Image (tube, grey):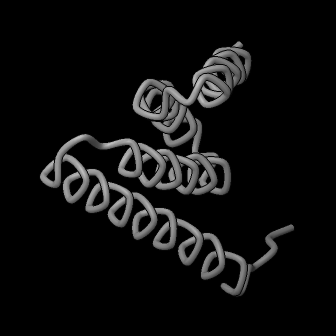
Amino acid sequence: MKGEKEAALLERAGVEEKRYGWLGAVGFYEKAFGLALKLEEFLKAAEIREQMGFCFFKAALQAETHEDFRSRMKLAAGAYERAAELFEKIEEEGKRAKIKHP
């Protein structure tokens, strides 16, 4: 059930993107990101955070003021940094030795 809710949020974010409603899409991605973290789906969470960075970037290009542009670009950079941290965490977990107990 929780996976269905996440999928619905991602679908709504996609609809916003198609309408060029980048900031609206970010809101849905933020909720889906929280669900992915709660379910410990770190790869999905990283992918969602990466998409949020893209949406903030596109929103920056639509900004009407210099301040809005700078603010959204900073948000985009932060989202990409957080995605990179999550991807690194996933990679590190894959490299750890695992002990199999009978």
Which is nearer the eye, 24 or 59?
59
Which is nearer the eye, 77 or 35?
77
- Please identify the residue farthest to the left as the structure is shown: 67
- At a point 41% along the width and 51% down the height, the residue shown is 61
- What x and y, as percent, mark residue 32? 54, 30
Quarter of the rendering containing residue 15: top right
Quarter of the picture containing the C terminus is bottom right
- At a point 49% along the width and 26% down the height, the residue shown is 21
Q: Is residue 102 left or right of residue 25?
A: right
Which is nearer the eye, 98 or 78?
78
Quarter of the rendering containing residue 59: top left
Q: Is residue 56 left or right of residue 95?
A: left
Quarter of the rendering containing residue 93: bottom right
Quarter of the picture containing the N terminus is top right
- What x and y, as percent, mark residue 71? 20, 53
Against 45, is 84 above or below?
below
- What x and y, as percent, mark residue 10? 65, 27
- Please identify the residue farthest to the front as the structure is shown: 64
Circle count: 0
Which is nearer the eye, 7 or 62?
62
- At a point 50% along the width and 25% down the height, the residue shown is 28
Q: Is residue 1 left or right of residue 84?
A: right
